[in-house]
Amino acid sequence: MVLESLFNPFVVKKKPWEMFFAGFLYSSIGLLLSILVFQDMAGLLMVFFTVIAATPIVYNTIKNEEELDLNLSGEITLLKEHSKVLYFLLFFFLGSVASYTLAYVFLPATLVSIVFASQTVAIGDINRAVTTGSLTQFGIFKGIFFNNMRVLFFCLIFSFLYGIGALFILTWNASVVSAAIGNLIKTKISVISAGLGFETIASYFSITAMSLLRYLSHGIIEIAAYFIAGLAGGIISIAVIKHHLEDERVLYDALDLIFISIAVLFVSCVFEVYITPIFFY
C-alpha cells in the first residue's frame, strides 16, 4: 500500500512528531476521497479511509509492544516504552484534528453541513447526555466522566476484538473535536467581523489559538486515556492470537494500562469541568 510505505512504525516511534504529518495526510486524503466519491456519507467514510490508511503502522506498533511484554523485565521499563507509543498516537490524533478543522473552516458552508452532519449531531447528543438531570458542576462532572468511561470501555473492547479497533473511535473523536473547534472559530469570527469590518486578521489567529486551547487543554488528556485503553486492548488481542496470554506479564501490563487510563480520564474530567471554564468561558 502506497500510504503505508510513507511512514515506518519503528522510525516514527523514535520520532513521534512525524505522526502528526501522517495523521494530517491520511485524514486529508480520506476527506478528499469521501467528498469526491461518497459526498452524502462523507462524514463517516472519511474516518474509515483514515483508519484504513493508518491500520498497518498502528497494528505493527501494537504488535511490537506485545512482544516487549515478553522480552523486557520491570513494569516501569515497559511503561516507558509504552509512553513512546502514546506520543506517537497523540501526534497522529493532532494531525487528524488539524486536517479536519481546516476543512471545517475553509470549505463552503453547504459542503461543511453535509460532510460534518454526523459530527454535529454527535456534539448535540454529548451535550444533552452530559447536562441531563443536573446543571451543577458536580452533576456535569459526573455526566462527563460516565460518558467518557463509556467511550473508554468501547475503546478497550474494540481493540480487543479487532486489534486496532479503537483507532476508529479515536479518529471519529478527532473529527467531532474538529467540528466543535471549527464551529467555535466560525462563530467568533462572524461576531468580530460584524463589528470590526476588515480589521479581523489578528483576531482570526487569536480566535483560532483560543479555540484550539479551549478544547485541547483537556481534550489531549482525555484522548491520551482512550489511547492507553486502546493499547491495552490491542496488547491483549495480539496476546490471545499468539497464545501468549498465559504469560502473566502480558496480563499484568494490560491491567496496569487500564487502571492508568481510568486515572488519566478522571484528571481530564477535572480539567474540563473545574479548570478549563476559568480560562476559556
Image: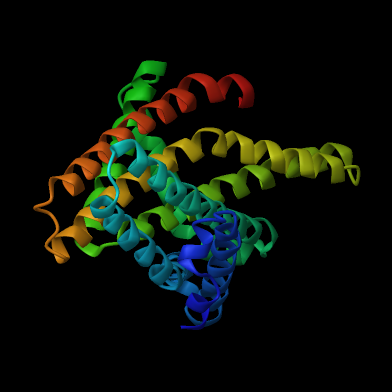
Q: Residue at x 21, y 40 (%)?
A: 255
> 215 or 228: which is nearer to us?
228
Q: Residue at x 48, y 19 (%)?
A: 274
Residue 176 visible: no
Color style of the picture: rainbow
Q: Residue at x 53, y 56 (%)?
A: 14
Please identify the quarter of the rendering in which residue 52 is found. Answer: bottom left
13 horizontally vs 133: left or right: right
69 horizontally vs 226: left or right: left
Q: Is 150 situated above or below 43?
A: above
204 horizontally vs 265: left or right: right
Q: Is 174 situated above or below 48?
A: above
> 226 or 235: which is nearer to us?
235
Q: Residue at x 78, y 44 (%)?
A: 205
> Which residue sits furthest left?
246
Residue 118 position, x and y percent, is 43, 58
